[in-house]
Amino acid sequence: MKYVLVSFCILCFTACSSMTKSGDGVIDRPFSAVDASREIVLAPERSFEIVLPSNPTTGYSWTVTIEDVHVVQNVSHEYVADRSNRVGVGGNTTWSFQTRSAGKTAVTYLYQKSWEKDVAPTRTVVFTIIVR
């Protein structure tokens, strides 16, 4: 019975770890605003994505700032609208990043209208990325 329990625990651990990382250095699951509440620790030269809900038809868009570009580099971003026949439907914006050298940085997102300079952002999301 003891061996069955140990074997089951090892199997569960292996299954969970294979769901989060693939062999090519890409995190399989993109990070979302929920992940901003904790530090994200990654290895150097690793690709990862952050996905946030957005709706550019309202005039709002995300502005991203990386505190230390030597730690994390923004590779690309893409907006994809939700599949719907409705006008003005929202969607998600996905940013692709590459970790560089070891260190700690903040990736800050501000959701606001670009022409409103003296107005606080509607939403702010900050991710803490640690590369080691």
Image (spheres, helix red, strand yellow):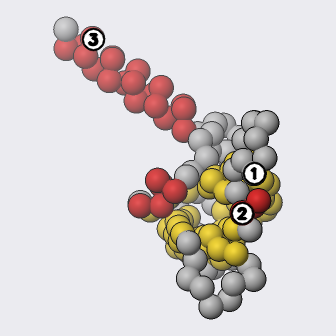
Of badges 1 and 3, nearer the viewer stands 1
The extreme top residue here reads: 1
The type of residue carrying mark 1 is Gly
Residue 8 pos. (x, y %): 33, 17
29 lies left or right of 96: left
Determine whether the residue tagged by mark 2 lies in a helix, strand or loop: helix
Closer to us: 89 or 47 = 89
Local SS, label 3: helix
- Residue assigned mark 3: 4
Q: Is residue 15 left or right of residue 79?
A: left
Q: Residue furthest left?
A: 1
Residue occupied by mark 2 = 58
x%, y% of residue 27? 62, 44
Q: Looking at the rendered structure, which numbered label has been put on residue 88?
A: 1
User: SS at mark 1?
Assistant: loop
Residue at the image position 52 percent from the left and 56 percent from the top:
33
- Give the x, y percent position of residue 75: 78, 62
The amino acid type found where label 2 is placed reads Thr
